[in-house]
Image (spheres, rainbow, N blue to C red):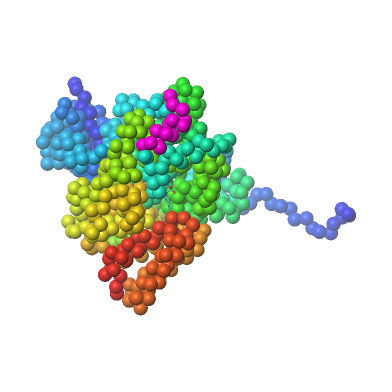
Amino acid sequence: MSNQSPKRIIPIKLERKTSLSADDQKAVHDSCARLKALPGALLPILHDVQSALGFVPKDAVVIIAHELNLSRAEIHGVISFYHYFRTEKPGRHVVQLCRAEACQSVGAVALEAYAKRTLGIDFHGTTADGAVTLEAVYCLGNCALGPSAMVDGRLQGRVSPERFDALIAAARQPS
Amino acid sequence: MSITKIFVSGDAAARGVGADETAAAIMALAETRGIGIQLVRNGSRGMLWLEPLIEVETAMGRVAYGPVASGEVASLFESGFITGGAHRLAHGLTAEIPFLKNQERLTFARVGLTDPQSLQDYLQHGGNRGLAAALKMQPADIIKCVTDSGLRGRGGAAFPAGIKWKTVLGASGAQKYIVCNADEGDSGTFSDRMLMEGDPFVLIEGMTIAGLATGATRGYIYLRCEYPDAHRALNAAIATAYSNHYLGADIQGSGRQFELEVRLGAGAYICGEETSLLESLEGKRGEIRFKPPLPAIEGLFGMPTVINNVITLASVPIILDRGAEFYRTFGMGRSRGTLPLQLAGNIKYGGLIEKAFGLTLRQVLYDFGGGALSGRPIRAVQVGGPLGAYMPESQFDTPLDYETFAALKAMLGHGGMVVFDDSVDMAAQARYAMEFCTIESCGKCTPCRIGSVRGVEVIDRLCAGESPAKQEVLLRDLCETMIHGSLCAMGGLTPYPVISALNHFPEDFTA
Ligand SMILES: Cc1cc2nc3c(=O)[nH]c(=O)nc-3n(C[C@H](O)[C@H](O)[C@H](O)COP(=O)(O)O)c2cc1C
Ligand code: SF4
Ligand code: FES
């Protein structure tokens, strides 16, 4: 074989362009470094990244894939399977409304309609001011004190439209 | 100065209606008034309509006040609640409140009574006696005790716990696992959550005993991520257990090992199914595995694995402590022991009721529950989660027993009961059951994935009055296909709420 191949060699670029800030990249690398030795490490890593960044950006997937020696498609497959993981940046506050039966029996359907109307968004949407992302959830284990919601990881019971307004107003307060 | 012990629940449900604010108000007012108190954030007593519940320790026992919003705290001080004084919100001694007094609390014996994070409290209230007994027994004898107690899985399928353990003991593998199913995805249920928050050490103890019985040295608690309070409670208790040698390489000087870790789910209902859960624990999509092999033979990472519900595992310590005979004496038929029921939805007195099997639905709904919250008649109750049947008034005298429910094409499942008053639209509930299946199906088999989408469409057409007789035949056919053609109970049981609604409430399925 001749070593004077006419083919042009295209160098492989190791540095990918990323949309992540240096801090965010570091956070993702840190999560991987800390957790990747665990058996079944992918879910713990995804949780860790989402709790640090609020979501799992697609450029984080590139890093995780590399660290775990998995394909990006495999990781996407996992992310898309689970309702909890999101790939878009959420608002400053995440409000999850329970849609399940016990909450339905005490007005969850009406509350859901009220929430969507007053916020002007559907589930998975974020208000125009970037303050609130609305999500659906199927039971929060608060079924005797519904309708239930979770605001930034904090459970709320007996959520009437008035209480919903108060929770949103409190979330919107600059802290 | 004497110090008065005051209890305000730290349970998520109590916090969700203001328990933190109430607790803070008590601390602040006690300080300004120069009253010495010790505030304990206990688990919830399970009388959820009384939350935030305050209990004051007096010479006669604990006195209850509730529900106490933070704004009411000042008036409690005025009334001298520190010594159990009379007040509009007073209920006398907590233990004498009929809702609590009429229960038989075995698994939940300590929940609400103790400080959930205090190992000392745990030990003083009978904790770790089951473990101490198990440490002196041979694995086969531990399993015999669990088998003889009649304990069946509380996660839904009611499979005898001892038989599962025996299979794992007999299986060989380099590493065996104990996996606790804490996914508690069923709507209308919260007993797992209350137990993990209110008495986490009992779950650790139960899992450790399961490890001793089967030779498993590693355990995982697969916890749904919707339960951040339980996550904190478990992690803190596990850390305490490690530092006091109730977990780790040498449990209480026995030379026996058990390691335990919490893993979070990510909002997929199907991951409560055991094989899906194992996939998820391995870091994959939660798709159902074909059975066989059983998880007991080839489970987590291909190794022999016990997988049990939180309540199943948390019931083991008292069985080892008090003996199989003691536990067996509770219950009826082949349903032995107690079931922690969760009374939920449109109900006046909702909460956790632990009772021996055999009481009737009507007793639960009216004697404990006091009827619908709205004051209207109760029209339907969904028992056993989103895959459970809707039961009409004519079935309210059914005793709570696995076999009796199965004979009615209903199921007790994890013991959740969701109450609906007469304003409910049962066609909408049937439609929701199908919709839920479209959202949560793992997608592996067609009857479930596609059938549920068709189900929603057919119900819509039926209710719109488009040749209804034909649609009803179609819907029933579709349900048969889902029941018989689905790989797991997600697709296989979704028809139960649908068909029960259609059979018992046909008048709602008209245009
Ligand atoms: C769709 C589906 C969801 C389930 N969800 C749960 C659950 O959230 N928690 C649970 O303990 N069992 C759940 N199960 C039952 C488990 O598959 C399994 O039977 C149980 O974990 C075994 O434990 P046990 O014998 O102690 O009940 C579910 C089953 C199915 C089909
Ligand atoms: S019945 Fe549904 S959830 Fe179960 S394996 Fe089939 S598609 Fe998956
Ligand atoms: S059904 Fe809404 S919290 Fe359980």
Tell me residue B5's x, y (percent).
23, 28
Foreground: B268 or B169?
B169
Relative horizontal placement of residue B105, taking residue B442 as reference (left or right):
left
- Quick one: which residue is furthest to the right in this view? A2
Dominant secondary structure (helix, strand or loop) of the stretch shown in magenta? helix
Magenta stretch contains residue B70: no
Q: Nearer the viewer, residue B472 or B190?
A: B472
Q: Residue at x 55, y 55 (%)?
A: A77
- Asked whether residue B11 appears in the rendered view, the answer is no
Q: Position of residue B365 (x, y in %)?
A: 22, 51
Q: Is residue B185 visible?
A: yes
Query: In the image, which residues are magenta?
Result: B136-149
Q: Is residue B469 above or below residue B328?
A: below
Name above or below for residue B52 compared with residue B385.
Answer: above
Q: Check the image and name the residue furthest to the front.
A: B333
Quarter where residue A36 is shown = top right
Q: Residue at x 43, y 58 (%)?
A: B492
Estimate the x, y position of residue B403 in percent, counting from the top left.
Answer: 34, 50
